[in-house]
Image (cartoon, rainbow, N blue to C red):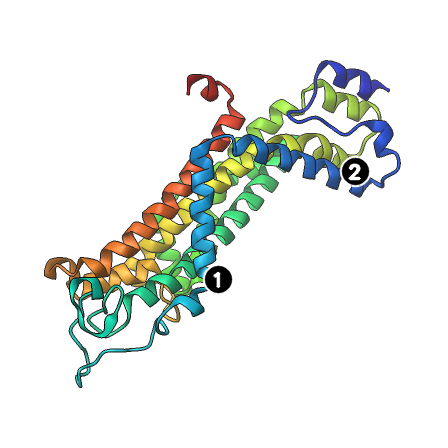
Amino acid sequence: MTESMSQEHERSIFEDIETDEDEQFSTWQRNLRLWKETISEQFRMLIEDPMVVLAMLTLAFFGLIAVIAPWIAQYPPTERVFTSGALIAKWVKPSFLGGEGGFILGTTAQGYDIFSQLVYGARPALMVGLVAAFMTVGLGTLVGLTAGYYGGYVDDVLMRLVDFVYGLPLLPTVIVLVTVLGPGLENIILAFVLLQWRTSARVIRALVLSLRERSFVKAAKVSGASNWRIISRHIAPNVLPMAFLYGAFAIAWAILTEAGVSFLGLGDPESVSWGVMLQSARVYSAMTEGAWWWFVPPGVCIALVVISGFLIGRGYEEIVNPELQVEG
C-alpha cells in the first residue's frame, strides 16, 4: 500500500506493471515481464531517430555478411589463389580496373583474394565488438549497482578499484596485456574488458546513488522488499538506458582497439580481420605503391561499423538526457 501511494507521485523512468495483474505471476515472471516492457519501450524510443535506424541497418548488414560469408566469398580467406609460379606474387588489380582473373577487389601481394578476406573479416570484428561490449557493460553495471546501492565499505573498495583502472591508458595497456597473454581475439577481448568497464561502473554507480533516495525505492524498503527485488525491479530497469549507452560506445571502441592491436601484428594469427588486412597492406607497402583496393575497403568497413556504434550511442544519450531532443 505504501509503495503504491508513493509511486503515484514518483515513478520509475518506465511504467511499472499493474499490481493486480502481477499477483498471478511469480516474482521472477514479474521481473521478466517488467524488463521486457522496459526494453521494448527503450527500443521504440530509439528507432524514432532515423540516423539510429540507419546505424542499426548498417550493423545488421555486416552481421548478415558475417553469417553468409562462406556463400559469398570467392575463396577461403587464407588460400593463395594467385602465385604466377613464384613464392610471393605481385598483387592483381580488381576486375573493374582491368585486372586479370576476375577478382572483385584484386589480390594481395601474397596472392590472397581481398574480397574474401574483407567478407570474412566481418566475423572477428563483430565478435570482438559485441562480446566485449556485453562483457564490459555487464561487469560495469554489476559493479555500479553493487557500489551505489550498498554504499559504505563496499562502495569504497569498488570505487578505489575503479580509480586504479582509470590510471591505465586503454590502447597501450591492451597492447601490453595482449603481448603478455599472447595474440588472439579472446585475449584482446579480455584485455579490453579489464580496462573499459570502469567508465560504465562509475556513471551507473552515480545514477544508483540518486535512485536509491527516490520515494518508490524507499517505499519498497518500508514494505519489506528484499534487496534483490529492489535492485532488479526498481533500480536496474532505470539504469538500462545508461548501460545500453555505454554498450553501444563499447562496440565502437572494441572494434577500434582490435583493429589497432591487429595493425601492430598482435591480432589472431588463425583468422583474418580488417585490422590484419591493414597490417598486411602496410608491411607490403600497398599504400606507397598505390594499391588502394587493398587497404581502403577494410578501412571503410571499420569506419562504418564504428560510426554506427557511436550513432546508436547518441540515440541512447537522447533517452538518458531528453534535453538533447529539444536541442535537436
* Residue 158, numbered label: none
Q: Name the residue: 78% across, 25% down.
A: 220
Circle 2 SS class: helix
Choose mark 2 or mark 1, whichever is in front: 1
In the foreground, 242 or 292? 292
The mark tally for this picture is: 2
Which residue is most to the right? Answer: 24
Residue 119 % position (x, y): 37, 62
Give the mark, 2 or 1, whose residue is nearer the N terminus: 2
Q: CA distance from mark 2 to mark 1?
A: 35 Å
**Contact check, label 2 and label 1, Cβ < 8 Å:** no
> Which quadrant is home to the N terminus?
top right
Within-10-Å neighbours for mark 2: few <14, some 14–19, many 20+: some
In the foreground, 61 or 168? 61
Which residue is tagged 1?
A: 67
Which residue is tagged 2?
A: 30
Residue 253 % position (x, y): 40, 45
Which residue is most to the left? Answer: 289
Horizontal side of residue 328 vs 104, given as left or right: right
Horizontal side of residue 270 vs 295, given as left or right: right
> Which quadrant is home to the C terminus?
top left
Residue 126 % position (x, y): 45, 55
Q: Amino acid at mark 1?
A: Val
Q: Name the residue: 79% across, 26% down.
A: 221
Q: Name the residue: 49% across, 26% down.
A: 318
